Image (cartoon, rainbow, N blue to C red):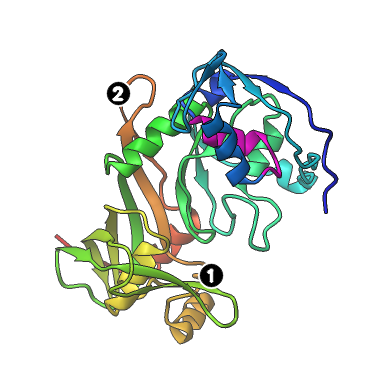
Amino acid sequence: MNELSKAAVLALEVGPEQEGQRIDNYLIRVLKGVPKSRIYRMVRSGEVRVNSRRVDATCRLQAGDRIRVPPVRQAAPRPPAAVPPAIAKRILPVIHEDDELLVIDKPAGTAVHGGSGVSHGVVEQLRAQRPQARFLELVHRLDRDTSGVLVLAKKRSALVELHRQLREGEVEKHYSVLVLGRWHNARQKVSLPLHRHVLASGERRVRVSAEGLPSRTIFTLERSIGGYSLLDAELKTGRTHQIRVHLAHLGFPIAGDEKYGDYGRNRELARAGLKRMFLHARRLRFMHPATGEPLALEAPLPPELADFLAGLGPAESGR
């Protein structure tokens, strides 16, 4: 168990990277090891002051705000685990960067963050490569085996605004996906509720279930190639494994999907050169969080997917 640091009054000042954050979330991040119930009780009772005034838990912080926190015992901080040099030096292609955003083309096989058996992910790698960055957080996530456009925020205000756009459905998200079988509809809207569950082995899975959360995907046929179909998948909601589960449920598993796909066919595909899941986050479009101007970001199919597709032979138009 971590030793607890000596309790003392904390005087904090909000930096630009924390602007727009709620006071309760801010304190949960700052006061490591302090129970959330204790934090909310301090706020409700007026023990926490912002600019010498009482606030409630929904108070949004501004840069320069001064926060007084009463004496509270918190866990002694643990230094973050060092990122191995080989990972820290790995190059991640940058699609776009400005004062608010960093957008990369994430390779398949790389987790976006550490956890669940992965020591270091994209965000830890980028923080190690950019020690001067005061703030760098994931705006959204991609599965480990999915490649493509991944957005990180360099300011708290940008993160808050892009999360708002995601919640309101204002972010346009398109994926390229190759499925087993011949897809017949030029355009098909799929609305199926998804439920997350844990298998007896401890593995986390998602299935279509009436008790799940609503999820919507629009699939557009790009082309048919033999016994395969190349689709554009537009996500209207962002549930875990949404595209993968929707397609598997419809009888069109993604080529190379080890979790929801056709295991026998996947072995054949691996021998034919496809050694990963054919799912790629191709395009994102949203309003820039600072300027309000539309921003469209694209990542081309990675070579291993483009080469496999070309090797399947001539295609028929899907439109």
- Is 61 part of what is drawn in magenta? no
For disc 1, the neighbor class at 10 Å (few under 14, some 14 to 19, many from 20) is: some
Q: Is residue 150 left or right of residue 128?
A: left
Above/below status of 82 relative to 30? below
Q: Earlier in the sequence, mark 2 or mark 1?
A: 1
How far is disc 2 from disc 1 in space, using C-alphas? 39 Å
Residue denoted by label 1:
275
- Observer-nearest of 52 and 298: 52
Magenta-highlighted stretch: main secondary structure? helix
Element class at badge 1 = loop
The span picked out in magenta is: 22-34
The residue located at (40%, 51%) in the rendering is 281
Residue 49 picture quarter: top right
Q: Kindly report which numbered mark, 2 or 1, lies closer to the viewer in this rendering.
A: 2
**Residue 101 — which label?**
none
| Residue 62 visible in rendering | yes
- Observer-nearest of 27 and 273: 27
The residue located at (52%, 33%) in the rendering is 44
Say what amino acid the circle numbered 1 marks.
Lys
The residue located at (68%, 42%) in the rendering is 34
Residue denoted by label 2:
293
- Residue 292 location in percent, x, y? 31, 22
The residue located at (34%, 76%) in the rendering is 248
